Image (cartoon, helix red, strand yellow):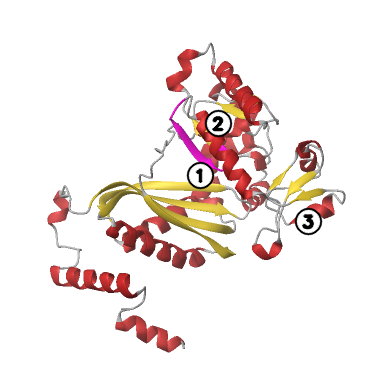
Amino acid sequence: MDLREIPAIIGGDQKSRHGVVLAKSTPAKRYGIRTGEPVANAFRKCPNLAMYPPDHKMYREKSRILMEYLRTYTKEIEQVSVDECYMDFTSIAKRYHSPIDGAAEIKDGIRERFGFTVNIGISTNKLLAKMASDFEKPDRIHTLFPEEIRVKMWPLPIGELYMAGRSSVEVLKKLEIHTIGDLAQSDPAWITSHLKSHGRMLWEFANGRGTDTVQAEPEEAKGIGNSTTLREDAATVEETEPVFGELAQSVGRRLKAAGKKAGMVSMEIKYHDFRTVSHQIQLERPSNDPRVLKDTACSLFLEVWSGEPVRLLGIRTSKLSDEAEPEQLSIFDFQAPAEPDEKHKRLKATVDELNARFGKGAVVKASLMRKKQEHE
């Protein structure tokens, strides 16, 4: 039995926080079943629904062999989830009569070698390629070039736009914006006034504006990072700040242990429905200071958060340099120093060393101890 041909979902156990629809077949989608919704809701929509538990070990293995196969074509691959990646076709384009011919060879090779199908979207940037890959499935190739946006993308319901979550869609519909084209032709300042920076980003996406840079990673890790799945979905900025604080402490300790500073900080969000988004920025000066890492991650979060519940947060650093490497100073560095003096730097280094040796919290500021006692 092929689960892709019947109303079926991959779900899990509620107690382990997997009591949601992780994946759905095309027939199940016709019943209005959505990825990320509770399994109980899905059965109310389709009582004869078939449900099977996830097999994460198999998914990881299939993902591994898929990426290995794709790397036989080019190393310029950015994997964004277990079953999704971007490929820069530029270096191999001359081998084929057209990008569609190259995509067909890749798609058919995957089906013949591994027995599963993929959809491929082709365009000039990652956003439009992603949108194209989500058109009619399975085992299809779609293009969405800038000149095709008006015909292929603008007529779609606003909920089909990448990163347009349920809460954003509700706001947009109240503004009489029902299609991607409606949003694209709206005043961006008006949209921003209702949805802040996320609204501006959605307006950019509706007009087909996205990055065209595939951030390929070598097989060996070229950065240090950490992420955590939350016990309960975070719904407010206040709930995310202490999480970023813990992650920043962990990443900062690992950077210092490796004798490294980071020139780039990346922040990752995984939403309640398993959509993932990341955002990064280059630091003015390389750092391994947890305070800098936390503040940067929080700032990046505010720039892209859609306002929807979040189940995972992460911080990753890259563009690493040796901690002892001399820094290029700017004219502003000769103003009154904002950095701690040498005495406080030595004190902070000693505290970090004691916490690393005897465990986090072995040494804390007296002011923090008083606050803790006041709450006990």
Q: Amino acid at mark 1?
A: Arg
- Judge left or right: residue 204 versus residue 366: right
Q: Could you say whether the residue bearing mark 2 is in a helix, strand or loop?
A: helix
The reply to whether the C-beta atoms of the residues labelled 3 and 2 are less than 8 Å apart is no
> Is the residue under label 2 in contact with that under label 1 (CB below 8 Å)?
no
Q: Which residue type carries mark 2?
A: Leu
Q: Point out the stretch of residues depicted in magenta.
A: 74-84
* Left or right position of 73 against 183: left
Please give the name of the residue rendered at 61% of the width and 25% of the height, measured from the top-left corner: 107
| Residue behind mark 3 | 41
* Residue 88 place in picture, x, y as percent: 46, 27
Residue drawn at (69%, 46%), measured in percent from left and top?
23
| Circle 2 residue | 128
Mark closer to the chain start, 3 or 2: 3
Q: Mark 1 — residue? A: 200
Q: Identify the element where label 3 is drawn.
A: helix
